[in-house]
Structures are given as C-alpha cells and as structure tokens.
Amino acid sequence: MSTLILLRRVRVENANAIAGVTWGFPAITHFLGFTHALSRRLSETEGLTLDGCAVISHEHQLHAHSSGRDYQFALTRNPLTREGKTASFNEEGRMHMTVSLLLECHGEIPNGEYGQRALSELLMKLCPTLRLAGGIIVSIQEISVMDAPADDRDMARLQWRLMPGFVLRDRSAWLTEHHQSLREQDPDATLLDAWLDFAALKMAAETPEEGEIKEGDPASWHYVPKPQPGYLVPLMTGYQRISPLYAPGVVANTRDAQTPFAFTEAVYGIGEWCGLHRISSLEEIFWRYRTTETGYYCQGANAPLAAGL
C-alpha cells in the first residue's frame, strides 16, 4: 500500500438504503462499485488503479417514519398515467449520508507533492460526476492524496482527520466460527441459522429451576445477546451465480446482448461499526473484491474464503 486517496466528508443525497433483504445503509458493493468506476477513469487518463476502499460514516438520515414499532419508507408520489390512474412503482428506500472514503491507489504519481496536488484537483472535478450508492454527490469537503502512514504518529493524524466517525469492517469470520459451533450442537444447523443469530433481535423465556410449569403462568423474557460483542450489522457483500453461464443473446431482454449472462442472487455477511480510535492498522478496515468462477464478493482482511450466505 503506497498511496492513499482520502475523500473527506462526502455529502450524498437520495442514496439507496435497501440492500437485498437488509436496509438502513447502502451495501458495501455500492462503495466498491464507486471505487471501480473511479479507477476506470483514472486508468485511462493517469495510468492509476484503485483497489481497496474503507468506509467511514459521519452522519446519515433515513427517509423513513415510524408509528411506534414498525418503520415505513417515505415514498414519492409518481405521476399519473395517461388514463389518470396511479402508476405502479417499486418501493424505494432513500437516505442522505455523509461519509469519508479511503481509497488504495496503485501506480506512479509523478512530480511528488505537485503531482499529488494535481490529482486531488482532478478528483475534485471528477467525483461529483459519478453516483455513489445511487445518490447524488452534492459536496466534498476535501480530497487528499498522501503516502500511507509510516508509523503510529502518522496513523493517529489520519484518524484525527476522520473523527468523529464510525468505520465499517468485515466480521464474516465470526459468522463461519459461529456456524461451526452450531453444527457441534445441531448437525442440521445451516449458515442461515448462524446469520440470523447476528441479524435478528431474539428473546427467550427463562425456565424456572424448581417447580413445574403450568399453562397460564407468566413467563420471564430476556434478551438473547449476539454471538459476539460490538455493533454488528447484517451486510450484503456480493453476488453469486445460480444458473449456467449463457451465451450472448440466448436470454431475452438482457441489458447487453453482446455479453454472456447468468442469473445471480445476493450474498450476505456480517459487519461491525466501530470507532476510529479502535483501529490500529488500515489493513483491517479495507474492503476488496474477491472473484471466483461463480461470483464476486466484497471482503475485508483475513476473511475466510467460505464466508457469506
């Protein structure tokens, strides 16, 4: 990791807040997709490529309202059809957010600090032309091109620039470990059972140690903690192929008739929001693509190859 690009406090409006069966924040695939789109632009003009991406959230505002328990998205009203009837629509969850992105840059930037400053100015013009999680980038406070931290002092300075904020890191390894522990107790336990232990809010009734339980007796309910501590959230982390790879033009109504086509489904994992002061190495917060013959996955450092649902 030689060079870092910091997009500090990117303000995004109307970003997509739904990711598969999860909601509340864009999927990590959105941020790596933005990184890939930006990398393609830079590779054409500057000969640079972008690989890893770290996501730091400073502020978010969901377009949703609640009657006390369940949440509903605040939807826009579509124009009427020619017949004067209400047009059908798919429910869309939107949100405003302010995030910082730390990108890993590969390639030679000529002219030292002057070249880094010129690249920052180029990115300040280029980034607002792209979409981030389907939303519009309305402002970027600062874009910096810098060398990777060489010691703890440089790391502390970088953390200070990103505070206050929470960084998202991959915890799919915990999902694999928890699934293995469930299999020891129940051989029929699935990876979905393990994922729901992280994602669902579970309550259990306490069983009295003495005496018999009679019908109608009040139960004492308590919260079942998640398998691991921390602010853990379910994540959509990629796509996996569920059909053969069809030749171009075989499947009707595809977006591109010149490219092979396959049906896919979403892959899910576990993430953790943690404070920046708890990060000791940049490697543990970077997300990168891992591609196979059957799909592509977004994973952090030390993630197991079999992680994901």
Image (cartoon, rainbow, N blue to C red):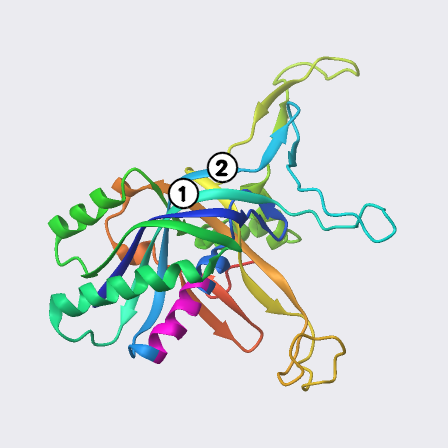
Residue 68 visible somewhere in the drawing: yes
State the mark number for residue 273: 1
State the mark number for residue 283: none
SS type, badge 2: strand
293 or 68: nearer the viewer: 68
Name the residue furthest right: 83
Near mark 2 (Cα within 10 A), the count class, few <14, some 14-19 or many ≥20, is some
121 or 302: nearer the viewer: 121
Q: Position of residue 301 (x, y in %)?
A: 36, 60
Quadrant of the drawing holding the C terminus: bottom right
SS type, badge 1: strand
221 or 171: nearer the viewer: 171
Indicate which disc, 1 or 2, sits on the residue closer to the N terminus: 2
- Residue at left offset 12%, top offset 73%: 111
Q: Position of residue 265 (x, y in %)?
A: 64, 63
**Which quarter of the figure has residue 37?**
bottom left
Q: CA distance from mark 1 to mark 2?
A: 17 Å
Query: In the image, what residue type sits under mark 1?
Result: Trp
Q: Position of residue 192 (x, y in %)?
A: 62, 51
**Which quarter of the figure has residue 288?**
bottom left
Quadrant of the drawing holding the N terminus: bottom left
What is the magenta segment's predominant secondary structure? Answer: helix
Residue 304 visible somewhere in the drawing: no
Left or right: residue 264 versus residue 279 is right
Decide whether residue 36 is among the magenta residues. yes
The magenta segment is 34-44
- Residue at left offset 74%, top offset 48%: 79
The residue that disc 2 covers is 61
Mark toward the viewer: 1 or 2? 2
- Residue at left offset 51%, top offset 75%: 292
Decide whether residue 138 is among the magenta residues. no
